């Protein structure tokens, strides 16, 4: 084993052992029982204890709760539950004969071979998440191995609220996941994830590989899910799992917005050019996108949109071919709707200062006045959260809201 691999292996084993230990402590189970037997559904935090929680098959939800749930009128023709149950999509081998395809890098070939596969089954679902009056739904792109980031978010900006004040409804949080992209990670991490979801009840997982190019799949799966299960949510914040978010600033910003507006606000890039340098993470070959610039789009680190617009986006995105960069793809969907994303100073998805070594990037007084800041590791997030919400004296008040 290489040193790097050994370190990763060690830390995986360590977190596994920790989780088991916590579980054993909390439930009085033997370590053997933890991995074999799912804990009875009556245990767990109150939010996760609701009868309809943790149903892998969304159809069960509608069958079981027929008496207690009044059916929502389906004006939009959305299905009443996740309706994709098999992942039966084969590669489009037609492409392999084309010279332009043969000249592409392997990961672009992989993307194009499966580009037509748009929807996959759900592995973990929470149809109950939007029951009641939900004002702000916070959704976080996450991957199975980043348990510590989810934990830090749950303790900070992901904390749920029954009411956000001013007669407005609840704030709820969900994490969006695919499956582990490395074979050796899959079995163990999946079990841990299922357990984590039993504790917190805040994970949506679909049966596609969590790879960089599949982030666009995550986008459309979430929009479809929202259309089915959260048709009445007022606003949605969608962000990365390594950002700092100020929910109180988000709520202050939203206070004089109406959910009917076509609100889509974030760190917006105008006329960004596709990157043609091959060693860049965002490199796009001309064969995939030939225009000189992208439509306006908001950086995926964090953006805010109205619930009604999100539902229309779902339908608009269904008419757009999948694109390997998720935030650009969403810009393409917005273009179909003729909606322009709005830039806001408080969204700093490239850091407060683009100069990474700048002291401003660690200055709590700046963070206090921002809506979203990229990019913080879990320990940094917890520390910054503590500073911003502690006895902070700032010499001057920044006005960004
Ligand atoms: C999956 O696709 C294959 C070939 O396209 C077909 O033979 C098979 O019946 C399909 N399975 C399901 C469950 O749809
Ligand atoms: C494959 O290519 C042939 C010939 O160009 C075309 O007729 C056929 O529809 C293609 N099949 C798919 C699945 O795209
Ligand atoms: C996306 O996920 C699907 C389903 O798991 C997989 O077949 C495909 O290879 C993935 N695409 C990329 C580009 O990773
Ligand atoms: C904040 O300041 C007050 C008064 O100076 C003090 O009583 C309190 O303990 C401080 N809180 C924190 C978290 O430092």
Image: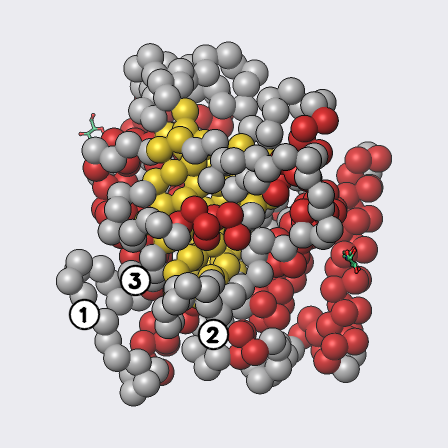
Could you say where residue 53 lies in the image, as x and y percent from the top left? 47, 74
* Residue sitting at x 37%, y 72%: 132
In the rendered structure, find residue 53 and report the number of the disc placed on it.
2
Could you say where residue 120 lies in the image, as x and y percent from the top left? 38, 52
- Please determine whether, in this image, residue 357 is positioned above or below residue 183: above
Look at the numbered disc 2 and give the secondary structure of its residue. loop
In the rendered structure, find residue 232 and report the number of the disc placed on it.
3
Q: Is residue 344 visible?
A: yes
Q: Which residue is mark 1?
A: 73
* Residue sitting at x 62%, y 39%: 367
Structural distance between the alpha carbons of marks 1 and 3: 12 Å
- The quarter holding residue 330 reads top left
Q: Nearer the viewer, mark 2 or mark 3?
A: 3
Look at the numbered disc 3 and give the secondary structure of its residue. loop
The reply, left or right, for residue 161 in relation to residue 331 is right
- Foreground pick, 149 / 346: 346
Q: Is residue 112 visible?
A: no
- Please determine whether, in this image, residue 67 is positioned above or below residue 193: below
Could you say where residue 357 lies in the image, as x and y percent from the top left? 72, 22
The reply, left or right, for residue 338 in relation to residue 12 is left
- Ligand 2 is found in the corner quadrant, namely top left
| Quarter of the rendering occupied by the N terminus | top right
Mark 1 nearby-residue class (10 Å; few <14, some 14–19, many ≥20): few
Q: Nearer the viewer, mark 1 or mark 2?
A: 1
* Residue sitting at x 41%, y 71%: 128
């Amino acid at each position: 084993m290489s040193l790097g691999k050994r370190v990763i292996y060690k830390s995986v084993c360590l977190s596994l052992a920790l989780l088991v230990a916590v579980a054993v402590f909390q439930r009085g189970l033997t370590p053997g029982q933890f991995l074999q037997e799912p804990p009875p559904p009556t245990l767990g935090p109150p939010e996760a204890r609701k009868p309809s929680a943790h149903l892998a098959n969304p159809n069960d939800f509608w069958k079981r709760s027929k008496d207690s749930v009044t059916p929502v009128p389906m004006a939009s023709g959305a299905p009443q539950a996740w309706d994709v149950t098999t992942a039966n999509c084969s590669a489009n081998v037609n492409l392999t004969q084309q010279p332009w395809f043969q000249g592409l890098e392997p990961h672009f070939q992989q993307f194009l071979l499966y580009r037509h596969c748009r929807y996959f089954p759900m592995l973990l679902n929470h149809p109950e998440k939007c029951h009641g009056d939900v004002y702000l739904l916070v959704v976080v792109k996450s991957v199975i191995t980043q348990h510590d980031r989810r934990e830090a978010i749950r303790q900070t900006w992901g904390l749920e609220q029954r009411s956000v004040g001013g007669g407005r409804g609840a704030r709820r949080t969900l994490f969006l996941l695919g499956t582990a992209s490395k074979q050796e990670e899959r079995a163990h991490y999946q079990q841990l994830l299922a357990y984590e979801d039993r504790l917190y009840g805040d994970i949506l997982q679909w049966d596609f590989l969590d790879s960089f190019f599949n982030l666009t799949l995550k986008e459309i799966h979430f929009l479809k899910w929202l259309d089915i299960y959260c048709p009445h949510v007022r606003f949605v914040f969608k962000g990365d799992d390594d950002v700092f978010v100020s929910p109180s600033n988000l709520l202050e910003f939203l206070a004089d917005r109406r959910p009917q507006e076509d609100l889509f606000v974030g760190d917006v890039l105008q006329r960004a050019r596709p990157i043609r340098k091959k060693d860049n993470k965002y490199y796009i070959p001309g064969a995939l996108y030939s225009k000189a610039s992208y439509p306006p789009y908001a950086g995926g680190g964090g953006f805010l949109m109205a619930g009604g617009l999100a539902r229309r986006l779902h339908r608009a995105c269904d008419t757009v071919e999948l694109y390997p960069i998720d935030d650009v793809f969403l810009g393409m969907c917005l273009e179909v709707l003729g909606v322009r994303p709005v830039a806001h100073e408080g969204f700093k998805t490239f850091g407060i200062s683009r100069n990474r070594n700048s002291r401003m990037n660690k200055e709590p007084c700046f963070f206090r006045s921002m809506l979203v800041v990229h990019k913080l590791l879990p320990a940094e997030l917890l520390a910054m959260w503590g500073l911003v919400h502690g006895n902070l004296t700032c010499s001057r008040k920044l006005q960004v809201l």
